[in-house]
């Protein structure tokens, strides 16, 4: 028995670490050489217990990422500090990770525990006699597997190959993102809405800032745009990404699971993307283990996963629509 994981981002590494924990052989097929470009990611404090469960908590501690107690938000009014929360151990703190570095650390951990990395591009899917997904076609040849977990992010490789419908829940939203270096007087991380969208700025390393601007596609800023407060800083070329809210209609089926952005994408305002990628990678892998051990049947696992992921995504959609409605953004009706 073996599992093929498409993509070595946070979802893929989390799935691999979960499977390797119970000695199930894993091949991760990753098309890009790491470290690859990523936005600097703000990690919700909820990530800490997950990384501890995966046995990689030390990766976060040793990385020395900047910590923060909450976010400054100017959501239709004056800037206000919104703390993450607190418990008996004190206030919760998020991490301001360098996305590329964080992903590389997770993938390195999976490799050091025995994951095989195949540097190749997945271009197709293979099936067994029962018409279950039983492997992938890659630029390096076919790879057979008992299960395929698609963690290919917004490429949605398996959904495209299997022609799974992807439901959309927002107008077409585009994120433009970039980095700038220099001194900034304003507090960070911060999010500020305006009439056309919102802008996020976070310090990812001393005097290095990552910014993200999300608008509807027809209002997207040009490639040279940079947030007003960063105009005096040294800017790097920016990039864009489709962050339209979407979810594959069948996130699990015969021989496959979709995890992370491959299953569902929301715009980054909730800062849950990496958290959801890691949790869904772990959950998909856990359900694969249950099936391989004969503790649950495939249909039950697919249904459990579908319900679990849908309820999380729809909970976030509800909260985000409410926030956008309050500031009349993106056509969410009052
Ligand atoms: C501008 C922006 C800002 C964001 N900010 C935050 C934030 O602050 N906090 C947060 O939590 N989330 C944030 N997110 C969301 C977060 O980045 C994603 O949710 C998260 O990276 C998803 O992880 P993943 O493992 O599912 O996919 P990815 O990290 O995208 O990994 C997918 C991998 O699959 C590989 N792949 C794709 N196709 C193939 C193929 N055919 N063959 C082989 N390999 C393939 C890719 O090369 C890639 O390495 C942001 C997103 C954007 C766009």
Image: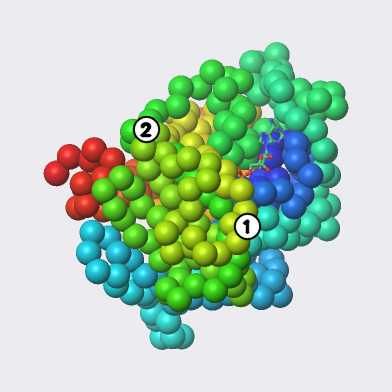
Q: Residues within 10 Å of mark 1 (few under 14, many from 20)?
A: many
Residue 301, relative to residue 206: is it above or below?
Answer: above
Residue at position x 79%, y 44% from top?
33
Which mark is first along the chain, 2 or 1? 1
Task: Give the label, 1 or 2, closer to the camera.
Answer: 2
The quadrant where ligand 1 appears is top right
Residue 25, relative to residue 21: is it above or below?
Answer: above
Question: Quarter holding the C terminus?
Answer: top left
Q: Report x, y in % for residue 196.
A: 30, 45
Residue that badge 1 annotates = 99
- Dot 2: element: helix
Q: Residue 218 bears which disc, if any?
A: 2
Residue 327, relative to residue 31: is it above or below?
Answer: below
Residue 46 appearing in the image: no
In the shown orientation, is residue 219 left or right of residue 278?
Answer: left
- Dot 1: element: helix
Q: Residue 312 bears which disc, if any?
A: none
């Amino acid at each position: 028995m073996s599992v093929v994981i498409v993509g070595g981002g946070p979802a893929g590494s989390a799935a691999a670490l979960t499977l390797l924990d119970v000695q199930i052989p894993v091949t991760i097929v990753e098309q890009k050489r790491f470290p690859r470009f990523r936005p600097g990611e703000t990690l919700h404090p909820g990530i800490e217990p997950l990384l501890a469960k995966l046995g990689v908590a030390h990766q976060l501690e040793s990385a020395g990422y900047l910590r923060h107690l909450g976010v400054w938000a100017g959501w239709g009014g004056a800037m206000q500090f919104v703390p993450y929360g607190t418990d008996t151990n004190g206030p919760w703190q998020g991490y301001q990770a360098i996305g590329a570095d964080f992903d590389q650390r997770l993938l390195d951990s999976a490799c050091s525990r025995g994951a095989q990395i195949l540097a190749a591009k997945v271009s197709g899917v293979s099936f067994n006699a029962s018409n279950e997904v039983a492997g992938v076609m890659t630029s390096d040849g076919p790879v057979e597997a008992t299960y395929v977990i698609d963690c290919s992010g917004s490429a949605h490789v398996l959904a495209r190959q299997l022609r799974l419908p992807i439901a959309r829940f927002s107008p077409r939203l585009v994120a433009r993102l970039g980095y700038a270096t220099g001194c900034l007087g304003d507090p960070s991380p911060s999010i500020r809405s305006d009439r056309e969208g919102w802008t996020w700025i976070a310090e990812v390393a001393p005097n290095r800032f990552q910014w993200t601007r999300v608008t509807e596609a027809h209002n997207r800023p040009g490639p040279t745009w940079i947030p007003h407060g960063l105009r005096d800083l040294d800017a790097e070329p920016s990039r864009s990404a489709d962050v339209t809210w979407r979810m594959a209609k069948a996130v699990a089926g015969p021989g496959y699971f979709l995890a992370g952005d491959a299953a569902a994408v929301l715009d980054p305002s909730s800062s849950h993307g990496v958290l959801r990628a890691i949790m869904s990678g772990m959950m998909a892998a856990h359900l694969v283990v249950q099936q391989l051990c004969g503790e649950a049947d495939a249909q039950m696992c697919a249904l459990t996963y579908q319900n679990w992921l849908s309820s999380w995504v729809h909970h976030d959609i509800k909260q985000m629509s409410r926030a956008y409605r309050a500031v009349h953004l993106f056509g969410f009706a009052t």
